[in-house]
Image (cartoon, rainbow, N blue to C red):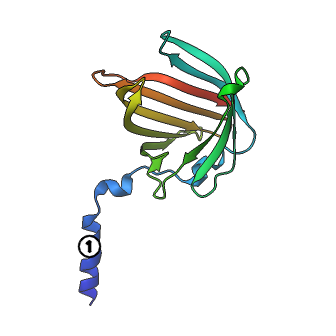
Amino acid sequence: MRTIIHLVFLSTLLTLSPTQAAEPRVDQADLALLAGAPFSGTLSYLDYSSDEIEKSPVSIQFNMPKRGRITYRVSYPDNAYYDSKERIVISESGHKLNGEPVVSRETLADGTLIITTAYRGEDNNLPADIRMTYAVHANKLEIRKEVRFDGDRIFFERNAYRLTR
């Protein structure tokens, strides 16, 4: 009987790929420190019509995470038309953020958590590789979208929220 249990255990270990245990994960606690006082700063984005980087002041107020999601309100003081309510959803396994695979997760010496997702999508109606990077800290937040169009070799910054509180 003991031999059978050992064989079942061993076969279970062998069927797990080495990357399954090492896949980066995100959980609700990672985003909990976003709740509280609002963040304020700027949204910078590449305006494709002028090929210029535009900047706009922005404020974001996060709610406490619940059931694998955190909701937040984005306010643009110079243009309330673009104000919105948004959410970040963490998959049950923690391997996806807003439906996109988490490809890396690291914590810097100052406590900043860096989460990166990557996926195929479109930008400016063109197919592209898209990389989202979330740098989360109690007093600062950066959400950066980088794009690499098919045929290009490098990513460029499409937009970024850079915020403090």
Q: Is residue 157 left or right of residue 29?
A: left
Q: If the image is split into quadrants, where does the C terminus sit? A: top right
Left or right relative to 115: residue 121 = left
Q: Secondary structure at mark 1?
A: helix
Q: Is residue 104 above or below residue 140?
A: below
- Residue 1 at what x, y percent from top left? 26, 90
Say which residue label 1 marks: 10
User: Is 17 or 6 nearer to us in this picture?
Assistant: 17
Q: Residues within 10 Å of mark 1 (few under 14, many from 20)?
A: few
Q: Position of residue 139 (x, y in %)?
A: 68, 36
Q: In front: 107, or 76?
A: 76
Residue positioned most to the bottom: 1
The residue under label 1 is which amino acid type?
Leu
Furthest residue in direction right, as rendered: 37
Mark count: 1
Identified at 28% across, 87% down, the residue is 2
Quadrant hosting residue 128: top left
Which residue: 61% across, 17% down?
55
Q: Residue at x 73, y 24 (%)?
A: 77
Q: Quadrant of residue 111?
A: top right
Say if 60 sits above or below 32 in the image: above
Horizontal placement of 17 versus 98: left or right?
left
- The answer to whether 12 is drawn above or below residue 55 in the figure is below
Q: Position of residue 24 (x, y in %)?
A: 43, 49
